[in-house]
Amino acid sequence: MTSTGLEARVDPATQRTDADTTISALIARSNALGSDPRITNYAGGNTSAKGTDTDPVTGEPVELLWVKGSGGDLGTLTPAGLAVLRVDRVRALQDVYPGVEREDEMVAAFDHTLFGRGGAAPSIDTAMHALVDAAHVDHLHPDAGIAIATAADGPALTSTIFGDRVVWVPWRRPGFQLGLDIAAIKRDNPQAIGTILGGHGITAWGATSDEAETNSRWIIGTAEQYIAANGKDQPFGPVRPGFEALPTDERHARAAALAPTIRGIAGHDKPVVGHFTDSDVVLDFLASARADELAALGTSCPDHFLRTKVKPLILDLPASASVDDTIERLRTLHQQYREDYQAYYDRHADETSPAIRGADPLIVLVPGVGMFSYGKDAQTARVAGEFYVNAINVMRGAESLSTYAPIDEAEKFRIEYWALEEAKLQRMPAPKKLATRIALVTGAASGIGKAIAKRLAAEGAAVVIADLDLAKAQDAAAEIGNTDKAIGVAANVTDAGAIDQAIQQTLLHFGGLDLVVNNAGLSLSKSLLETTEQDWDLQHDVMAKGSFLVSKAAAKVLIEQGLGGDIVYISSKNSVFAGPNNIAYSATKADQAHQVRLLAAELGEHGVRVNGINPDGVVRGSGIFASGWGANRAKTYGIEEQDLGKFYAQRTILKREVVPENVANAVYAICTDDFSHTTGLHVPVDAGVAAAFLR
């Protein structure tokens, strides 16, 4: 057993055990390493520490391994994300190890080595951490380290750059045998502080947590410095004329114009959310003469291609090509990509392989414009793009010093369609009903719109809160979560240009659009004789014209994507109910109600459903009622304004007050697959107003 220099004891001053101290140091190191994208990427790599705790059964000290669990992220790791195993029992597995052809069985064997309930599920890399004779071990995926690992003469470069402090390990798929290999290197090379794992990444170790982190950073920093000092200029070749980056505004406009087509391509087999990146790293790579050649080689690090697929789809037209020509070429390349991916699967699959998971690209590269990346949600899509940026950096480093030589195709397939990877996917929770859907809600910084945005986000949708007040829109989005969940944008729905800008921001941030809620509105309560021409125009501009403009702009995206979609109008009970002192409001709501029917008839052939919600008496939280409408309606009915909600409730059949969340529930329901065959419908959310029954 390895001595850790720790004994099971409690510090009387702090009441912290040795285990507490070990775990705390491990979490701090993990978070520090994981927060730097040069060192490792999201959910990539793993760290560990060995220490002593008390066995509650025997009361004796027991040596334990704390290691990042399967699927965790170093940058945000907490103690709950650690797997906890008995070191003696993990090392005893060496005696029953059946050999490399059956090493997948060892992952299940880890369950019999857990300490207590064991914390998080152990990952495939657990053996590496347990078998290496060091108290602290880091396995990381730094760009500079992988550049050496994927260089054709990686072994010689490792010796030149690091001397005997770092040892080359030939490519081996992660698993028990790799752990044995690295343990042997550590044993046979006492001067070494780590390894370069061919095609993969680095491993480093230390007697203390600080020493392990220092050694990891020394390997990475030394590799970076060597590449910077010795790498050749233009490792990707010269710039291709016509493939240079477009000016920013033109680039973003082109990206938004292409986004619906590209999302339709990426979502051909299954729906996805997207992300757009136009960093200098991406644009410089796409402008280079060797971009097509290198992209075709694919990524190498398993963490990379599991997120990005083995290679991207790259457009072979210059930035000067027209949008129409670009779209046509992208569709042709998509068909070729699908055929190529199917052939790749057929070359390597056997009777034990999982079914093909879809033949569409997850990374689409457009010279002069940027990169579109896709995944099951916005975070996954964004991270896929980050991984491909890492891959570009790896290719640059490898080509600067040598020749980029990723692991071969057969090995990529073995990992992409690994039974253990398939099992991990099968363990994931079922997606929520609106997962992969991208929603734009107008007038959503408060009231009904805000409640709708929150409900859609809670059900898995990525949400764009569009409002006249940008600051309030952004605040409302922040209440929902980070920018992988929701963003706020400015949108004056009476201005076609402002609407186009809001939809462009939606496309650039989430890659597409599926669900539009026309909620923006206002109301003036006046009699016919008191209603001015300006009152009439304002009401109709915001709601009738505004809904028309938003629906028109959104329909272009929905049709081009070819993925169907939903447009929902928040109309009103007043669209069918005649009452005094609201001529302008009720007339424009009737306009909206008929837009629902007209657009349902027109857009149905594209799989786009158009439905409406007819609320009534939503007083609490309503921006409309707070802006004077409530006071005017209360005056009309001869009651106090604070009693208006109760008044509306008592005149309903159900005697229930309607609140914004009731409207949000109806919007959610009408957009689910439960209503897949429903369009042109108006759903009353008024607690029952007989005079407003639809006939």
Image (cartoon, rainbow, N blue to C red):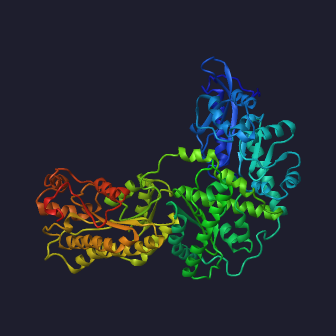
Please give the name of the residue rendered at 78% of the width and 71% of the height, measured from the top-left corner: 234
Q: Residue 620's quadrant in the figure?
A: bottom left
Q: Is residue 237 above or below residue 65?
A: below
- Say whether residue 686 is left or right of residue 541: left
Q: Who is closer to the viewer here, 409 or 128?
A: 409
Whether residue 463 sits left or right of residue 519 in the image: it is right
Q: Position of residue 244 (x, y in %)?
A: 67, 77
Residue 91: % across, % down: 73, 30
Extreme-left residue of the structure: 638
Q: What residue is at 67 percent from the left and 41 percent from the top?
A: 124
* Residue 622 or residue 656, whichever sits in front: 656
Decide which of 78, 84 is in the foreground and name it.
84
Location of residue 693 in the rendering, given as x and y in whole percent from the top left corner: 17, 62
Quadrant of image for the N terminus: top right
Residue 209 shows in this picture:
no
Image quarter in which the C terminus is found: bottom left
The answer to which quarter of the image holds residue 117 is: top right
Q: Which residue lies furthest to the top in this view?
A: 58
Q: Which residue lies furthest to the front in this view?
A: 351
User: Is 663 displayed left or right of 16 in the figure?
Assistant: left
Q: Position of residue 370 (x, y in %)?
A: 61, 70
Look at the image and tell me whether residue 163 can be seen.
Answer: yes
**How many numbered marks have been drawn onto this rendered protein structure?**
0
Vertical position of residue 378 compared to residue 110: above or below: below
Please say if 256 is above or below 433: below
